[in-house]
Amino acid sequence: MFLAEQRGRFAEAADHYEQVAERFPDSTLALGQLAITRLRAGQVTEAVPILDRLEGHKTSSEVATEVNQAIQTLKSKRPPKINE
């Protein structure tokens, strides 16, 4: 975990994880942390392709749990859909 992430500066932390993911493109840990920090930074559009890359790959239960928690947090903050 980067200091920026510990301090709640998720966009900055995501930039650091982006560099790690570029260096280790097959690392599900790096990709998972990148997706998590993008989601926590509210950068959903940027997080979606990363999550797509992770789909179907084995990763640690810790990363999977964090990704799911970040997604649930975003869903809870999203305004409800209006049914017509």
Image (cartoon, helix red, strand yellow):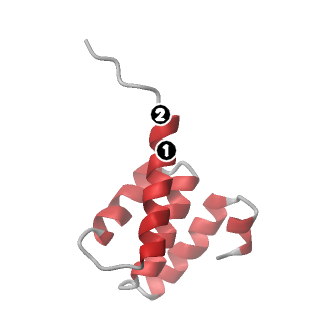
Whether the residues at callouts 2 and 1 have beta carbons within 8 Å, the answer is yes
The N terminus, quarter of image: bottom right
Q: In terms of depth relative to the viewer, which is nearer, 17 or 66?
A: 66
- Tell me where residue 12 sits by quadrant: bottom right
Question: Is the residue 83 above or below the residue 8 in the image?
Answer: above
Left or right of 8: which side holds 28?
Answer: left
Q: In terms of depth relative to the viewer, which is nearer, 8 or 49?
A: 8
Left or right of 53: which side holds 78?
Answer: right
Q: In the image, residue 2 lies at what x, y percent?
A: 68, 75
Q: Residues within 10 Å of mark 1 (few under 14, many from 20)?
A: some
Left or right of 33: which side holds 82?
Answer: left
**Residue type (three-letter) at the residue carrying disc 1:** Leu
Question: Is the residue 5 above or below the residue 28 in the image?
Answer: above
Q: In the image, residue 55 lies at what x, y percent?
A: 27, 68
Give the labeled residue for mark 2. Answer: 78
Query: Which residue appears at 23% of the width and 72% of the height?
Result: 56
**Residue type (three-letter) at the residue carrying disc 2:** Arg
Query: Which residue appears at 29% of the width and 63% of the height?
Result: 52
Give the labeled residue for mark 1. Answer: 74
- Tell me where residue 57 sits by quadrant: bottom left
Query: Which residue appears at 51% of the width and 46% of the height?
Result: 73
Q: In terms of depth relative to the viewer, which is nearer, 40 or 66?
A: 66
Marks 2 and 1 sit apart, C-alpha to C-alpha, by 6 Å
Residue 22, disc: none
The C terminus, quarter of image: top left
Query: Which residue appears at 53% of the width and 79% of the height?
Result: 19
Q: Secondary structure at mark 1?
A: helix
Question: Is the residue 48 above or below the residue 75 in the image?
Answer: below
Q: Secondary structure at mark 2?
A: loop
Q: In the image, residue 8 lies at what x, y percent?
A: 71, 58
